[in-house]
Image (tube, grey):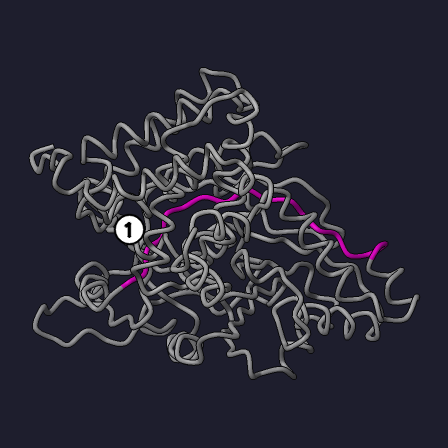
Amino acid sequence: MPTPPSTPTTPAPRLTRASAGVRPPAPVRAVHLGLGAFHRAHQAVYTMADPDWGIAAYTFRNADLPRTLAEQDGLYTLQVRGNGQPQAQIVDSISRAHPGGDIERWLADLASPDVALLTLTITEAGYRTTGDGSAIDRVLAGLRGRHRAGGAPIALVPCDNLPGNGDVLRAAVRGAAEGEDSAFRSWLEEHVSCVDTVVDRITPVAGEDDVAAAAQLTGFDDHAPVVTEPFSEWLLAGQFPLGRPMWENAGARFVDDLAAYEQRKLWFLNGAHTLLAYTGPALGCATVDEAVRHPALAALTESWWDTAARHAALPPEDLADYRERLLRRFSSRGIQHRLLDIAAGGSEKIPARLLPVLRAERSAGRLPEPAIAALAGWLIHLQDSQVVDPRADELVALARAADGARRVLSAVDGGIADDRELISAVDDYVDQLRHSADVLPDADPAQ
């Protein structure tokens, strides 16, 4: 890490490559779509392990962030917080940052034969093709330009929490290309690889306090800091026809089959997050670490993990170790992971994180309390909260109508909506959660 300025009273200099003594930008060999905190805590950090690879990062949602990063030469501070003292490093793998309006540069980057891969963090909703400038439409436009420019092969690397995310991306691109000419569609099949991934690193939204903390930790004025946890995981399976960075130098693992690892992460980590996001607010909890210290919510979480373990593909000892690590991560006070942030996009998350286990349990004749609790909490969230979801208007109206539980569940899975015993259990649990603050024990602040 560069040495901070020696005089404490001197205003911190703006973080740039010159002020921090950081290497010049690496040649752009990777493009990223979705310039958010997770990418900057995850893929950008792994890419920093290979100094020959630079990233051109794009966002179609936020014009301020790429402007800020451009002023900082692509640099930002990564603050890693566990239960001890926070640590910081300056990440330098982003060579250029662009707003989505820079269409010409986007098309030029994707057409370049020097660019070997495109990584994406576009959220679960981003894989839908809407025909109105969606992320997939922009990816297709870039691939179309690459085909016309000579057709160099490329790897697409989705990094969102979707089972079989490589297959999901491939299907989305194929669907968007249905009206294209046959030569282009053949090129997509033969020269565009879609890599499957499992990604994991808890990365909450940074605030103004984190800007001040970055200056204290590094001595530089950083207007785009990222806060994350010590743990990080990246598993990949697929082909990279023009090569890739040496991500394994930073701990990435390349495996033949990701299915069991995808299942473990979606059910155990993401499923528990979703459970806490929808049940925690009923007991006055605002963050994950608060929620897992509440005895009732801790019991629900352990019950969910017991339930998911009955249907998981990995050996019991692997799952037990994973659960222990998750509990340590969830309990860490270094990361304030807001339940309200996790609650966003329930219509995309619940079908992948909770419903596979719930369906398996119902096939065995069981009514798993934690899944019922999560669905009941989601219903309350839809009825009472400011909902952030691609289907918010539809789902809020359904949740607030008579027979709301059946209507909402029918919108995400018609099969479970026909399960009268399940619907009745969800309705009963809604009442229980609404009165839970009066009947359930409070969290122990000393834990």
Q: Is residue 440 above or below residue 23?
A: above
* Rendered-image quadrant of the C terminus: top left
Tell me which segment is drawn in magenta: 189-206
Please report the residue visible at 82 percent of the width from the left and 56 percent of the height from the top: 191
* Residue that mark 1 sits on: 337
Using residue 3 as the reference point, say whether residue 38 is left or right of it.
right
Using residue 136 as the reference point, say whether residue 272 is left or right of it.
left
Please report the residue visible at 30 percent of the width from the left and 56 percent of the height from the top: 340
Which residue occupies the foreground of this view, 147 or 280? 280
Q: How many marks?
A: 1
From the top left corner, tell me how far across and down residue 411 is, in percent.
55, 53
Callout 1 crowding tier (Cα within 10 Å): few <14, some 14–19, many ≥20: many
From the top left corner, tell me how far across and down residue 325 is, in percent.
34, 30
Residue 31: name its quadrant: bottom right
Residue 89: name its quadrant: bottom left
Please report the residue visible at 43 percent of the width from the left and 64 percent of the height from the top: 397
Furthest residue in direction front, as rendered: 402
* Residue kind at label 1, given as amino acid type: His
Magenta-drawn stretch contains 64? no
Please report the residue visible at 25 percent of the width from the left and 42 percent of the height from the top: 433
Which residue occupies the foreground of this view, 284 or 76? 284
Q: Secondary structure at mark 1?
A: loop
Furthest residue in direction right, as rendered: 182
Magenta-drawn stretch contains 195? yes
* Rendered-image quadrant of the N terminus: bottom left
Q: Is residue 410 above or below residue 211?
A: above
Q: Is residue 341 above or below residue 178?
A: above
Q: Is residue 223 above or below residue 168?
A: below
From the top left corner, tell me how far across and down residue 174 is, in percent.
78, 59
From the top left corner, tell me how far across and down residue 360 is, in percent.
55, 27
Residue 120: name its quadrant: bottom right
Using residue 430 as the reference point, say whether residue 23 is left or right of it.
right
